[in-house]
Image (tube, coloured by chain):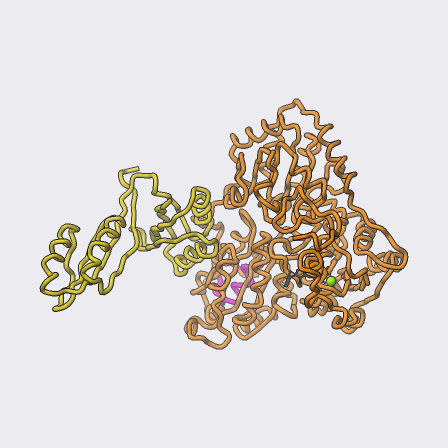
Chain colours: A yellow, B orange
Amino acid sequence: MKHLISVLVENKFGTLNRVAAMFSARGFNLESISIGETEDPEISRMTIVTRGEDRIISQVLKQLNRLVDTIKVTDLTHQPHVERELLLLSLKLSKSTQHEIFELANVFKGKVVDIKQKSITIEFVGSPDKINTAIDLFKPFGIRELARSGAVAIHRGES
Amino acid sequence: MHNNGEKLIGSEIFFECLRRENVEYIFGYPGGALLKVYETLHDVEDIKHILVRHEQGATHMAEGYARATGRPGVVLVTSGPGATNTVTGITNAYMDSTPLVVFTGQVPSSLIGNDAFQEADIVGITRPITKHNFLVKDVKELATTISKAFYLATNGRPGPVLVDMPKDVLNAECVFEWPESVEIRGFKPTIKCHANQVQKAAKMIAKAKRPLFYIGGGVISAEASEELRKLAIDQQIPVTMTLQGLGAFPGDHPLSMGMLGMHGTYWANQAVSNCDLLIAVGARFDDRVTGKVDTFATQAYKIHNDIDPTNVDKNIKVDLPVVGDSKDFLASLIEAMPKTKEDRSSWLSEIEAWRKQCPLDYAVEQDSLKTEFVIDEVSKQTRGHAVVVTDVGQHQMWTSQYYKFTEPRSIITSGGLGTMGFGLPSAIGAAFGVTDRPVVLFSGDGGLMMNIQELVTAVYNKLPVKIFLINNSYLGMVRQWQELFHQEKYSFTDLAASNPDFVKVAEAFGCKAMSASNPESARNAITEALAYNDGPVLVDFRVVRKDMVFPMVPAGGSISDMLLARLNPKTMV
Ligand SMILES: Cc1ncc(C[n+]2csc(CCOP(=O)(O)OP(=O)(O)O)c2C)c(N)n1
Ligand SMILES: [Mg+2]
């Protein structure tokens, strides 16, 4: 099953490579990985989405912990958490589709970030599921390009 | 000797740090990126630099030194090719959990990434084969980085750490400060075992009818042999060991069952398959040990102690994991054991019956020489007290079967990676570290050629290494698999027409050498070699060419199902 893992790492060059290389060397599935600085500039947070049976996930967590540059590894999957992804979606635009595109974008709370005569780029934020649905529904209009950030996630509540 | 607060350049800081880490020997080879370091080295007297003849040799020497002494081995090589030549040795150390600190020179910081002359991204290359590695970007970080490197290499599960030092960093000046303590927030190995888990383990051991210790190299690196001995004898629990675990328990004790796994003893593998409690300590359920995992120790409740949590439940699901240092585990177990003792005599006699059913033995013929005889004879003449180094192949497996290891840090061999060429340089490294026991190398004729250049290092340093060449003029282990499993297609394994005259080769290096081709001359050669201590000596044992190592578990087979002798290959899959 899908697991969402949050890892605090040293904000040093090479850390992302160490984590990604460990996944490929051990044959673990790596669906997405995202990284950014935290409130402490020496520490970054990585959010990793992976898939596997329990035995594999337990190895993934242990192998992550074993890396010297990882400070804290948390499997958020079964804990209260918020998970978000950013999608930038660039679509073909024409008089006939314009209206429908705007309407659908509204449903997904999309924000237009760029618009030209024949193209429009919309920004969406949501759970990866919601992002998947959005992509599916916009497909018929003709997707020019898209970029996804990969999931970022954090604990919900005060624990 | 320099003091804190002195202004020093990088290369001076480098040696001062090694001094603070009590480094005795550096195994190294100079080059452009290290010119400043070698300039400083010229006036260093308390740390001995050993000039090797190939950087792979340096890493294996450092490994041999580390495994023989328990202290980290130190390697110093230049950038680019010097650094890439260490890759095999570093991988080997990583697989066998040997503490190494490898220092590489690097092109100046300003040129990194420019495909500069002799530039290699050694930090990138060695990321998956080191416990950790560092690129030092500023001379102010050099001392802390070196202290971290030694700390990481030796604490928790030991392993290799690499420190890459650009040329400008080694030339730059700063105030030297040796850090009093090391703090790495992402590295906090569990040393102390969980008391509840130990209690549970003690209960299981107390009531087991057919318990078995399965001991790995972790017991040796944790210096826990005394505890193991006490517990096993006290509780009457038989002990089987992995290749790296040999010597953790005395091989001449009735409770010792020798090695388990692919070329383990028949009785050890039967015991694994029939025990009701398997106590794995400092071992990692490697595939050469388990054979087919579905059929491994199926009747046993499994306890697994290891310092590295990733080893737990990796290959085999266990019932009771106990993460922590093996010395702590065994010592706490001794404390926790109840006073009442289970009678284990029927289990021990069952094992005895298996031992009698398929003993390890060989026939001695007067006019030909068997490897088993050579190893047995060396074992007897050294009374099991030598530091025994091997290369990789048939001779290695025969060594595990016929040398009676009686104490820890007695076998030095490439287990995890199976690196041919490991033997000679690691024997040299061991001989630098150990001077009160003979250092004996068993090498194949194939493997000896892979780092033969290091004979220079042995001769020049007058190291009394006994190089026992098991010369079957074959890549014997491969030939064995060709005979058993590959339709007797002896593809590129016969070296008879191409091997050199090893006695002449050794003599050309200035090494004493002799040969032997029957039991009588072999026995005398061994006596003479063991008595010669003015430098290395090579004995070319011309052994029978086509012998095979048995018993054997075919790859992927169950360990309860061993091949005891050669069967008709036509009936084999
Ligand atoms: C560097 C390396 N290359 C290839 C192998 C594959 N290999 C394993 S054993 C072996 C034969 C070793 O022959 P030799 O050194 O003569 O020892 P013997 O088996 O004859 O005792 C080979 C080629 C290896 N283990 N390491
Ligand atoms: Mg051979």
The answer to whether residue B427 shows anywhere in this view is no
Q: Is residue B303 left or right of residue B116?
A: right
Q: Nearer the viewer, residue B120 or B187?
A: B120
- Residue furthest to the front in view is B570
Outermost residue to the bottom: B117
In front of the other: B474 or B230: B474
x and y, in percent, of residue A97 in the image:
12, 61
Where A149 falls versus B207 (above or below)? below
Q: Quadrant of ligand 2?
A: bottom right
Q: Is residue B198 above or below residue B400?
A: above
Q: Nearer the viewer, residue B157 or B417?
A: B417
Compared across the picture, whether A30 is left or right of B272 comes to left
Residue at point 27%, 57% (across, down) = A148
Q: Nearer the viewer, residue B90 or A77?
A: A77
Which residue of the protein is positioned furthest toward the top in this rendering?
Answer: B340
Does the magenta portion include B8?
yes
What residue is shown at x 59% (from left), y 61% (from top)?
A: B89
Vertical side of B40 occupied by B353: above or below = above
Horizontal and vertical percent position of residue A93: 14, 64
Give the residue displayed 33% in from the left and 55% down from the top.
A35
Residue drawn at x 56%, y 53% is: B159
- Residue B329: image quadrant is top right
Image location of residue B37, percent across then percent down: 55, 69
Q: Range of the magenta residues?
A: B3-19
Q: Quadrant of residue B423?
A: bottom right
- Residue B26 placement: quadrant: bottom right
Relative horizontal placement of residue B211, taking residue B357 as reference (left or right): left
- B236 inside magenta stretch: no
| Residue A34 visible, this angle | yes
Q: Quadrant of the N terminus of chain B?
A: bottom right
Q: x%, y% of residue B38?
A: 58, 71
